[in-house]
Image: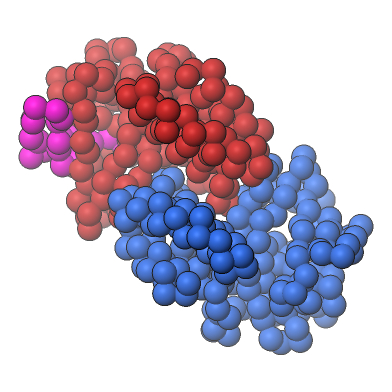
Chain colours: A red, B blue
Amino acid sequence: MMEKDFNLDDFGIYDGISETIVTTNKGWTPNAAPMGIIRKKDKLFIRLFKGSNTYENVLAEKKLVVNITHDPILFVLATFTDLNDSDFDTKAFDGISISSLKEAQCWIAFKCVNSKLTNEAFISELVPIRAHLNKCKIRAPNRGFCGVIEACIHATRYQLTEDEKYLKLIKAYGDIVEKCGGEAEKEAMKLIYEFL
Amino acid sequence: MMEKDFNLDDFGIYDGISETIVTTNKGWTPNAAPMGIIRKKDKLFIRLFKGSNTYENVLAEKKLVVNITHDPILFVLATFTDLNDSDFDTKAFDGISISSLKEAQCWIAFKCVNSKLTNEAFISELVPIRAHLNKCKIRAPNRGFCGVIEACIHATRYQLTEDEKYLKLIKAYGDIVEKCGGEAEKEAMKLIYEFL
């Protein structure tokens, strides 16, 4: 269990919505998906929409792992595909199996409390149960990285609605990635176009 | 002077364009402005457009300091105002005075080499001469922070052109900041609207 002086700031989670990759597992089968984690003061919340593997796994186990990463390719692959088993690190702590991403700068495992199930979603408060710091890396803001995140979100919306306005937005962010991104961001954007 | 094993990655500068705040000085008077730093493999470049204080200072001294920060308010204030003297740390090293931002996670001082002056801009390669690491802080990606950076850029373009399309873009990014940003991002966005 977590120590009393656990600080969300130390693990990169600030107020507002943090863009993270949430990992869950069904037995020893891990799953990863990009998710926004909402922080209000010192409380954290998540809203999971019905139908995803993450939703099913969290509903069954009432726990999840939040991974902090700035790897644009990982965000794209977790949006559109099942990551490889070799991307995960799965370990048992106190009888609970926890799957995290090897590539993450850090991860925090949470249990779900005060959960609510609506017709569309599972909404829950998150209480930390274990956390791990892999590496702290300074990274200047890069508009290309932001562009990949935005393009992933609009790509998901496009797949749900087929509304062409999302294609225009993806193209606009693709231009920013082309101008400002590094090799990883450009490769990530290429993958988005391929998955569409 | 820098050691041989200086690594740009350690100071958060990756390939593509890094969004930074560049500090310069005229004697003991420091100046700050947001600038994109271009990295291609292990070389860095900057392009400074005529007419700014940064341009004048760099042209006179052929040096500048790149500060890495994720403080959204600092990006907005450096875009629209002169920062307070108390925001800077100015010190002399080897007879060269170097102004950096106290709030920066790290900074790197560069000298300009292979510079070129065109009708519109000063273009130069940057060679590191000194660097300092203040603190490494993990920070999950936040779409609100990215929104503030984009809104700053469009606000500058709006002030130059008065083209209303930029106001629409600023408003769109303002909506993302309102939804995903923390208190600092929301305050930064409020400042942008005030400065317009």
Queried whether the magenta region covers residue A118, the answer comes back as yes
What residue is drawn where x is 55% and y is 51%? Answer: A141
Observer-nearest of B27 and A93: B27
Observer-nearest of B19 and B168: B168
Task: Mark yes or no: residue A10 visible.
Answer: no
Q: In the picture, residue B190 is in which quadrant? A: bottom left
Number of marks in picture? 0
In the rendered image, residue A63, in percent from the top left (x then y), is placed at 20, 29
- Horizontal arrangement in the rendering, residue B2 relative to residue B79 (left or right): right
What residue is drawn where x is 24% and y is 14%? Answer: A26
The range drawn in magenta is A107-126
In the rendered image, residue B119, in percent from the top left (x then y), is placed at 87, 65
Task: Mark yes or no: residue B47 visible.
Answer: yes
Residue B83 vertical placement versus B182 (above, below): below
Task: Characterize the magenta stretch by its predominant secondary structure.
Answer: strand
Quarter of the picture holding the N terminus of chain B: bottom right
Observer-nearest of B119 and A87: B119
Residue A92 vertical placement versus A123 (above, below): above
Observer-nearest of B75 and B12: B75
Residue A181 vertical placement versus A85 (above, below): below
Q: In the picture, residue B25 is in which quadrant? A: bottom right
What residue is drawn where x is 32% and y is 56%? Answer: B178
- Horizontal arrangement in the rendering, residue A177 relative to residue B98 (left or right): left
